[in-house]
Every structure is written in structure tokens, then in C-alpha cells.
């Protein structure tokens, strides 16, 4: 996370791990991802004002999606 002396650092700390490898992110991306997720979660009952949010995303194969459609 780098920031210039005339600009403060990112408002959010975001960690992105892709297939087990941590990805480096610029300050702008920390704020975009953090702000977007924070905004989405803020609308959920019981999650207003959350300080820590964790999301894990796994891509599912098409045949697995078809099996889950009956849930």
C-alpha cells in the first residue's frame, strides 16, 4: 500500500488471495473493493457498521450449479 505525502493512505485494508497466492493491490483498489463490499453489506440487517467483513468466493462448475438450483 503506497501513498504520496499529499494523499492519505487507503481507507480500507483489503487482502486478495487468488488460488492461495496473495495479490498486491494499489491504494485505489483497496478503497474501491473495500467501499463496494462495505456498501453492499451495510444494507443487510445485523451487519450495519461492520468493521471486519470476510468473503470467500469459489467458482463452481456448470454441472455443480445445476445440482444446486434445487436448493
Image (spheres, helix red, strand yellow):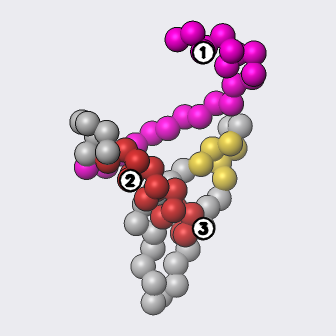
Q: Are marks 3 and 1 in contact (CB under 8 Å)?
A: no
What residue is disc 2 on? 39
User: Nearer the N terminus, badge 3 or badge 1?
Assistant: 3
In the image, taking residue 55 as reference, residue 24 lies left or right, namely right
The residue at the point 55 percent across, 69 percent down is 28
- Horizontally, is 5 left or right of 19 in the view? left
Magenta residue check for 67: yes
- Gap in Å between the C-alphas at discs 2 and 1? 28 Å
Q: Could you tell me if residue 1 is visible in this image?
A: no
The image quadrant of residue 11 is bottom left
**SS at mark 2 in the image:** helix
Distance from label 3 to label 2 (Cα)?
20 Å
State left or right for residue 42 relative to residue 24.
left
Q: Which residue is mark 3?
A: 26
Q: Position of residue 23 (x, y in %)?
A: 66, 53
**Which residue is at the front of the view, 57 or 65?**
65
Q: Nearer the viewer, residue 35 or 51?
A: 35
Query: Magenta residues, as a range?
Result: 49-71
**Mark 3 or mark 2, earlier in chain:** 3
Q: Secondary structure at mark 3?
A: loop
Residue ID for mark 1: 69
Please identify, in this view, whether the residue under mark 3 or under mark 1 is nearer the observer: 1
First reached walking from the N terminus: tag 2 or tag 1: 2
Amino acid at each position: 500500500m503506497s501513498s504520496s505525502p499529499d494523499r492519505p493512505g487507503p481507507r480500507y485494508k483489503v487482502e486478495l488471495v487468488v488460488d492461495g497466492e496473495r495479490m498486491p493491490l494499489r491504494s485505489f483498489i483497496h478503497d474501491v473493493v473495500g467501499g463496494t463490499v462495505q456498501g453492499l453489506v451495510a444494507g443487510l440487517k445485523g451487519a450495519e457498521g461492520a468493521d471486519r467483513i470476510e468473503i470467500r468466493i469459489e467458482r463452481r462448475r456448470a454441472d455443480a450449479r445445476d445440482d444446486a438450483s434445487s436448493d
